[in-house]
Image: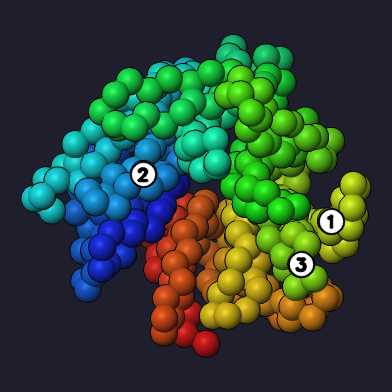
Amino acid sequence: MVYAVTALRSPGKISFLAATELYGEWHHYESPGYQPRIASHRPGGVMSLVQFSEEPVSVLAIEQSYPIYHFDKSRITLAAATSDSDAPWNKRVLVELPFLHRISLFHSEMGSYLIAATLAGSKDFQEDWSRPGAVYAGHVPDNSGDDWSLDLVFEGISRNHGMTVAPWQGRQTLFVSGQEGMFALRPGQRFSQWEINHLLRHDVSDMSVFDLDGDGREEIVTIEPFHGNKAVIYRNPGSVLTKELEFEMSFGHVVWTGIIRGRRALILGNRSGPKDLRILFFRGDGTLNHETMTLDEGGGPANISVVQGADKDLILAANHVKGEVALYEITD
């Protein structure tokens, strides 16, 4: 049940990290052989991995969020690689916050923030969504060894699943999604004042933001509803988003947008049905005309991480159903 993956950049090289949502290990993979080394023996329950620094290589992680919604002891940790590549990473707990589901780093002119979202305030049973979750933010301290803290940004977002940082209408923006829809957040002149826009008002599982058609304005691609059966592309002509295209999904869990081998691309992945991972390549001519390439079937990807290279692009996938970490190389 591998769940979280990320590419790690350090001077002169790329490596990869993968972790399980069960009670288990983190694996670190380095070229050329990519043989797994154990970066952490426990506790598992990893929902997110976000690189924090390049030298030494370190990551922020959500841990102790176990299936199904046993998130009452979840926490954010900071883990750093050691000089001995075979030794477990040094790790310390930064923040304890029940029902954590997603974290991100947000860099702006106001400083760098650690952002966290919870999927519920608390739960009495698996399908108890009566107490909404919230979004929290805290300044990243100048010295990572100092105390970290998070303050409430806003409440009222249930079943959070999506979080991404991307340009939007000329400014860096944090996007968060849940049962109540999709929100766009930007820090204000004071830390306690955040600009919050409610962009979509229906259940959104995950999202990605990028200019797919090449017209200079970003599209929003969502998976709907929670772990949903469709992916939707919304255009951004002005103040109201317009639904343009819809794709069938089956337990949709991967949505990524960006550049693959110089082409505007959307990557989608399903954890049931075909359990596939596919790339949609857009022409960038002002339309949403595209071609589709299936990378793999049967893996049931939970998450991916993408690296653009000089002669090839890499897609790292946590193939949850197969119980494997897969690396796909795109050369043309």
Dot 2: few (<14), some (14–19), or many (≥20) neighbours within 10 Å? some
Residue 75's place in the image compared with 330, above or below, is above
Residue 264 shows up from this direction? yes
**Residue at position x 68%, y 61% in the image:** 210
**Residue at position x 74%, y 81% in the image:** 283
SS assignment at label 3: loop
For marks 3 and 2, give the one nearer the viewer: 3
Q: Give the number of marks.
A: 3
- The answer to which of 246 and 54 lies nearer the viewer is 54
Pointer 1 with pointer 3, Cβ within 8 A:
no
Q: Quadrant of residue 63?
A: top left
Pointer 2 with pointer 1, Cβ within 8 A:
no
Q: Which residue is mark 2?
A: 52
Residue 101's place in the image compared with 258, above or below, is above
Q: Is residue 47 left or right of residue 127?
A: left
Q: Which residue is mark 1?
A: 236
